[in-house]
Image (spheres, rainbow, N blue to C red):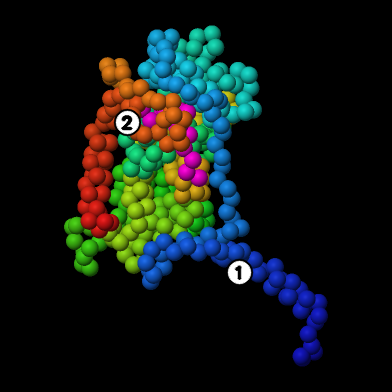
Amino acid sequence: MTGHRNPIVQRAVALGAIAALPLTLAACEIGPKQSQQLGPRGPAMEQVTNLNLVKPAAAPPASAYALTSRDGQKAREVYPELQVLGDISVDEFGLLMANMTAWVVPADAPPEQAGCNYCHNPENMASYEKYTKSVSLNMLKMTQNINVNWQSHVKETGVSCYTCHRGKGVPQYNWSLKPDPVSSGMAGYRPNQNEPSAVVGYASLPNDPNGSFLLNPREIRVNSDQIHPSDMNTSGTKDAEHTYGLMMRISGALGVNCTFCHNSQNFGEWSHSRVQKMTAWYGIRMVRQMNSDYIQPLATVFPAKGWDDQARLGPLGDPLKVNCQTCHQGYNKPLGGVSMLADNPSLREIWRADAPAPAPVAVAAVGAARTTNGVAVAKLVATGAAAQAVVGKADAVRSAMAPATN
């Protein structure tokens, strides 16, 4: 009958509309917001925080015991096979080993993998028969390199094994290289994009920014200083998509907006950006070095899976690597900016066998929340020509920015 409305149909339509409401608002975040102005008015330089999503940063575990002195018999006199950490005292060496156990070894590890057994054969502590000992040696060198040579990113806070591992043998946030996409016709071909991925904020952007930028030195900057095409900048739309994918990855890893680093008036202009942009510039290159110089060479050391049946290698046989989220885990400062180096000062030192003895460090300084870099550092070991070139270029950029930031 014309004009007749079936109440059952009306009720079904109403219920359907209510059910569809969450999907309609899927791009919005319900809840109270907090807005903080980070720069001049006009370019929308604000940090907007959903207070319902804010969680306190993870508190690092307490040290096994307090380091009261760095004096005493050298560790290499008791353990002559040591390749690193040989020039610290036996007491400090024992403390670091105890702390590393708490930082990395899972609490539910079986007896044969628990405690010192995670890396060592208890019958022959000098043996490298367990792959985890070779890995930990490389990771110690990497951590020391970060704390000494990358203070442009980690500042005085520094990093420790716990920054990434958080009590797990394999850090929770890792990545490996992706296989080439399989084509199933034009409609089914997705070259690692155009599919929902949290990595790039569920956008249609390329969803493998890690492999594109955090292992190889691919150029990130895509905007040009000229309006016409030239040999000075050959970047195209696809390059821009990859760069935006990386920016989405970093934004999510730190839990911040684009304007945490950039001035939206001109994203490419350094002199108008916040200092955090320079910190991030160093951080990207630091992560590249971590992956290429310290982790990727372990491809022949790692097994495909560990004792816990958890993967140690990706589908292409490369080791699980790090990105910004590995350390930051949703915070612009890992662990809320808490340093763990006061009781582990050897993590910000790089030693050589022929280095002179370091100057004595006062007990009060050792126990301080921030240890002055260089006080107990003997002689730095060069990290290779590539690393020196990166640091040199970074220093040149920072010098060029200096007049604009004064």
Q: In front: 42, or 105?
A: 42
Task: Please tell me how crowded label 1 is: few (under 14), some (14-19), or many (20+) other residues with Cα within 10 Å.
Answer: few
Residue 131 position (above or below residue 143) = above
Residue extent of the magenta highlight: 336-349
Horizontal arrangement in the rendering, residue 395 relative to residue 164 (left or right): left
Q: In front: 296, or 261?
A: 261
Report which quarter residue 247 is drawn in.
Answer: bottom left
Q: Is residue 236 visible?
A: no
Q: Is residue 110 visible?
A: yes
Residue located beneath label 2 in the image: 374
Mark 1 to mark 2 CA distance (whole Å): 56 Å
Nearest-to-viewer mark from 1 and 2: 2
Query: Residue 398: within the magenta?
Result: no
Residue located beneath label 1 in the image: 24
Count of numbered tags: 2
Image coords of residue 291 (percent x, y): 38, 36
